[in-house]
Amino acid sequence: MSDFFSVVEKRNSVRKYSDKPLSDDICRKLVEAGLRAPTAINKQEIHFTVVKKDNPVQAEIQNDLNPNAQNSFFYNAPVTIYLSGDENFKWSAVDAGIAVQSIHLAATALGLGSVVLGCMKDVLSGEKKEEYAKKLAFPEGYVYQIAIAVGYAEATKEQHTFDFDKNVSVI
Ligand SMILES: Cc1cc2nc3c(=O)[nH]c(=O)nc-3n(C[C@H](O)[C@H](O)[C@H](O)COP(=O)(O)O)c2cc1C
């Protein structure tokens, strides 16, 4: 278990994974990190769908995103977790964003790599929205909010730099 600030400083987006699968225990730990995240009025509405890489829905999404893509939009990660939220609750996007970051940090703390995935938003919200909602086991009235691919990192990259003075005002 790592100290919180070293996890925050270590976190980055991983875009290359080994073939090693994630155990059910680890998947559960990751989802629990999401479930522990705060939600507006403690609604706890975010739904988590854990999808293994050989599930045919992954290939379908990849194909709908770009049938000619040379690379996997999931970077061949063994697991992708989809977060869906109540279409009619105004805080679902924020709640899902907070929950996905908790999973991202939990993955880092566990020595795993992960990357937040927004790229499938148009495909999952487009004409096949209902079909995908069923295939991804979203509850009734729920829509895709965000996803995160997780696995054992096979490549790392530098942490991004930032400009404190540009992005922060202290008034
Ligand atoms: C809402 C959101 C959507 C993102 N979608 C994708 C994506 O579809 N594919 C991808 O490779 N990275 C995606 N990322 C990761 C960002 O590209 C990444 O966080 C950014 O380049 C900074 O790099 P770092 O996370 O390594 O610091 C997304 C990040 C966020 C917050």
Image (cartoon, helix red, strand yellow):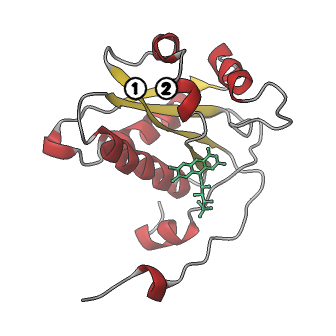
- Residue depicted at 63% across the width and 17% down the height: 57
**Under tag 1, what secondary structure?**
strand
User: Count the marks: how many?
Assistant: 2
Q: Quadrant of the C terminus?
A: bottom left
Q: CA distance from mark 2 to mark 1?
A: 7 Å
Classify 10 Å Cα crowding around label 1: few (below 14), some (14-19), many (20 and above): many
Q: Is residue 169 positioned above or below 22 on the image?
A: below
Q: Is residue 39 left or right of residue 12?
A: left
Residue 98 in picture, x, y percent from top left = 36, 50
- Residue depicted at 24% across the width and 39% down the height: 90
Give the mark nearer the N terminus: 2 vs 1. Answer: 2
| Residue 143: assigned label | 1
Residue type at numbered disc 2: Ser
Say if residue 159 shows up in the picture.
yes
**Under tag 2, what secondary structure?**
helix
59 or 152: which is nearer to us?
Answer: 59
Q: Residue furthest left?
A: 41
Q: Do the numbered discs 2 and 1 sit on residues whose CB atoms are within 8 Å?
A: yes
